[in-house]
Image: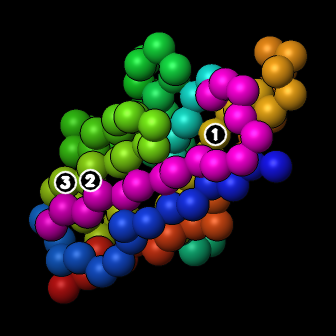
């Protein structure tokens, strides 16, 4: 099995920064992509950012250049210029081959709370 463990959430004032980290462990043959989704109370889960094994990145429209995703083993999300509307639970995900057959399954972390408030 695969585990994704997130860290780095917390409380920050508007305009502040946070850095989220996510490390994958377990039976991993290859990682096709990793990234972050978020879900605010009463809202649908939405893509924040993703990065493929080749380094291609994709961001939600609301990011507007404020966040940067990177990966060196673990995946990181640097969030700057945070706004109150960024408050949500942030979930790490990975599209991972755990069988060695070039197939993939989606795996999720337990989520980390990000609260932007003065």
The residue most toward the left is 15
Q: Secondary structure at mark 1?
A: strand
The residue most toward the bottom is 118
- Which of the colour schemes (rainbow, by chain, secondary structure, one colour) is used? rainbow
Alpha-carbon span between mark 2 and mark 3: 4 Å
According to the image, label 3 marks what residue?
A: 80
Q: Secondary structure at mark 3?
A: loop
Could you tell which of marks 2 and 1 lies nearer the N-terminus? 2
Residue 60 in sight here? no
Residue 12 falls left or right of residue 95: left
Kindly check if marks 2 and 3 are in contact, taking CB atoms under 8 A apart as contact. Answer: yes
Height in image: 43 above or below 46? below
Specify few, some or many for label 2: CA neighbours under 10 Å numbering under 14, 14-19, or 20 or more: some
| Residue 92 in picture, x, y percent from top left | 56, 52
Q: Which residues are magenta?
A: 16-31
According to the image, label 2 marks what residue?
A: 79
Q: Residue at x 62, y 71 (%)?
A: 42
Q: Residue at x 29, y 58 (%)?
A: 19
According to the image, label 1 marks what residue?
A: 94
């Amino acid at each position: 099995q695969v585990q994704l463990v997130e860290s780095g959430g917390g409380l920050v004032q508007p305009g502040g920064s946070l850095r989220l980290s996510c490390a994958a462990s377990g039976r991993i043959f290859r990682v096709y992509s990793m990234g972050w989704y978020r879900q605010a109370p009463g809202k649908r889960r939405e893509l924040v950012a993703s990065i493929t094994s080749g380094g291609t990145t994709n961001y939600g429209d609301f990011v507007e250049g404020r966040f940067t995703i990177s990966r060196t083993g673990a995946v990181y999300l640097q969030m700057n210029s945070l706004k109150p509307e960024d408050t949500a639970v942030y979930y790490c995900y990975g599209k991972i081959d755990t069988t060695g057959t070039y197939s993939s399954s989606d795996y999720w972390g337990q989520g980390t709370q990000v609260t932007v408030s003065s």
